């Protein structure tokens, strides 16, 4: 019996698929992701913001690696991108971030000063930006759209954060006063936070 040409082609394609698929490594799954969220209601204000991120575990040898971070763009968190969404304009570290969706990385300049590296999510994902280095030199395939300066408080935390933890804390009484905090080990990176919503 003769096998039709289309059936032959489909059979060959199916046989070829496993060999092709073996070149792709897949990570992730149902791993837990942490989030810090602030939702603001009342007096004519309705707004929300959230940062979602993977939580790497702190290791003691990281204390000696701070100098190696100088002059680098870094992944922030674990696994896929750390994301920031906000329905209101906000100001973090004196930098205005318009309402929208963003991807977050971390920048450390040559002097050791840290900053949140903020990317427009739609633009970055369309360009296939990934949160991890693309080569052994630690180079990234993205550049930040804005940098938000952070203050490093080195070794000053009373308790060690065994997993990376981020906190958005807006002040319900005065939206112009709040704090973004990133804690890992006994170190924190902080910036003042303001929600730019006109109260009615």
Image: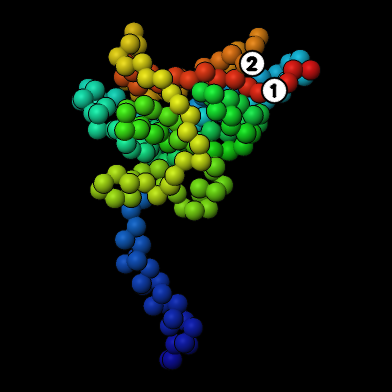
Q: Is residue 69 left or right of residue 85?
A: left
Q: What is the CA distance from the residue labelled 1 to the residue labelled 2? A: 8 Å
- The part of the image, by quadrant, that contains residue 106 is top left
Residue indicated by mark 2: 175
On the image, the x and y values in percent for residue 89 come to: 64, 29
Which residue is at the front of the view, 92 or 124? 92
On the image, the x and y values in percent for residue 122 come to: 56, 47
Name the residue located 39 percent from the left edge and 78 percent from the top edge: 12
Relative height, residue 25 to residue 66 (above, below): below
Which residue is at the front of the view, 162 or 103? 103
Q: Is residue 146 left or right of residue 173?
A: left
Q: Is residue 84 left or right of residue 159?
A: right
First of labels 1, 2 by sequence position: 2
Secondary structure of residue under mark 1: loop
Secondary structure of residue under mark 2: loop
Q: Quadrant of the N terminus?
A: bottom left
Residue indicated by mark 1: 197
């Amino acid at each position: 019996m003769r096998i039709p040409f289309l059936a032959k082609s489909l059979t060959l394609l199916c046989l070829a698929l496993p060999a092709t698929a073996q070149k792709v490594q897949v990570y992730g799954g149902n791993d837990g992701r942490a989030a810090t969220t602030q939702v603001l209601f009342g007096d004519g204000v309705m707004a929300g913001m959230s940062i979602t991120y993977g939580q790497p575990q702190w290791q003691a040898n990281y204390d000696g690696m701070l100098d190696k971070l100088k002059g680098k763009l870094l992944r922030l968190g674990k696994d896929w991108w750390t994301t920031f969404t906000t329905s209101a304009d906000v100001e973090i570290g004196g930098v205005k971030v318009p309402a929208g969706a963003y991807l977050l990385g971390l920048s450390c300049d040559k002097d050791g000063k840290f900053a949140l590296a903020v990317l427009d999510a739609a633009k970055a994902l369309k360009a296939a930006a990934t949160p991890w280095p693309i080569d052994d030199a630690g180079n990234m395939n993205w550049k930040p759209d804005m940098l938000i300066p952070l203050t490093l408080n080195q070794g000053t935390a009373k308790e060690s954060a065994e997993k990376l933890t981020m906190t958005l804390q807006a002040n319900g009484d005065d939206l112009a006063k709040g704090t973004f905090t990133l804690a890992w080990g006994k170190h924190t990176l902080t910036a003042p936070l303001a929600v730019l919503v006109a109260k009615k």
